């Protein structure tokens, strides 16, 4: 039986309630404001963030989630008995998130070859931003909960992104 894990980044704007309901792992994007590092959705709420931006002396910057973090997440998914991972990232043209997620697969396979054999990981560049791709993550997770097969879910997601 397939056990499918969904992973995305915090720029997907998936409401916390939906992420929790459908067991979607939302990885926080690192943000630097006035030289201090934060993790989106962990260190502040959206309303706090807007106030932080207004109070900032310089424009905040973001970074991508490190490939080592992705490798760690994949490892935990395998240890938790997942057979498949679908990781949908923010647009690769605007971020290095997709590349880091793919590099994380390589690192995971290198560090844990036997464990990696048990897990099929698919990383998808959403080619979009915000809830445009968050919606696809939620719909995919709903489909998995309904018992849809991995290939069927992947086909729906790829079709969705071909039209968005």
Image: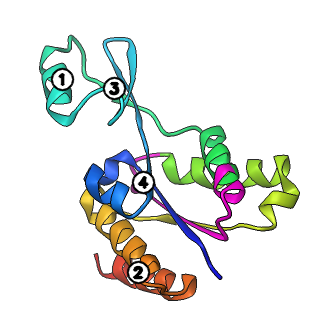
Query: Which label belongs to residue 85?
Result: none
Q: For mark 3, what is the residue?
A: 43
Estimate the x, y position of residue 52 in percent, counting from the top left: 19, 20
Tell me whether circle 2 and circle 1 mark residues in contact (CB < 8 Å): no
Verify whether residue 37 appears in magenta: no
Against 80, is 52 above or below? above
Q: For mark 1, what is the residue?
A: 53
Q: Secondary structure at mark 1?
A: helix
Q: For mark 4, what is the residue?
A: 93
Q: Is residue 117 visible?
A: yes
Label 4 neighbourhood size at 10 Å, few (<14), some (14-19), many (20+)? Answer: few
Estimate the x, y position of residue 71 in percent, counting from the top left: 67, 47
Which quarter of the rendered picture does the N terminus lie within?
A: bottom right
Verify whether residue 86 appears in magenta: yes
> Which label's residue is closer to the chain start, 1 or 4?
1
Q: Secondary structure at mark 3?
A: loop
Q: Which residues are magenta?
A: 76-95
Q: For mark 2, what is the residue?
A: 143
């Amino acid at each position: 039986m397939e056990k499918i894990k969904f992973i995305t980044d915090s720029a997907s704007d998936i409401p916390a309630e939906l992420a929790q309901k459908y067991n979607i792992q939302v990885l926080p994007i690192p943000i630097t404001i006035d030289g201090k590092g934060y993790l989106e959705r962990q260190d502040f709420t959206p309303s706090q963030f807007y106030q932080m931006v207004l109070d900032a002396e310089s424009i905040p910057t973001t970074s991508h989630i490190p490939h080592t973090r992705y490798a760690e997440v994949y490892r935990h998914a395998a240890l938790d008995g997942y057979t498949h991972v679908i990781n949908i990232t923010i647009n690769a043209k605007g971020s290095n998130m997709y590349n880091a997620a793919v590099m994380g697969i390589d690192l995971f396979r290198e560090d844990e070859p036997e464990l990696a054999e048990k897990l099929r990981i698919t990383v998808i560049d959403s080619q979009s931003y915000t809830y445009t791709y968050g919606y696809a993550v939620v719909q995919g997770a709903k489909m998995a909960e309904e018992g849809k097969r991995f290939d069927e879910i992947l086909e729906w997601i790829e079709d969705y992104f071909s039209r968005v």
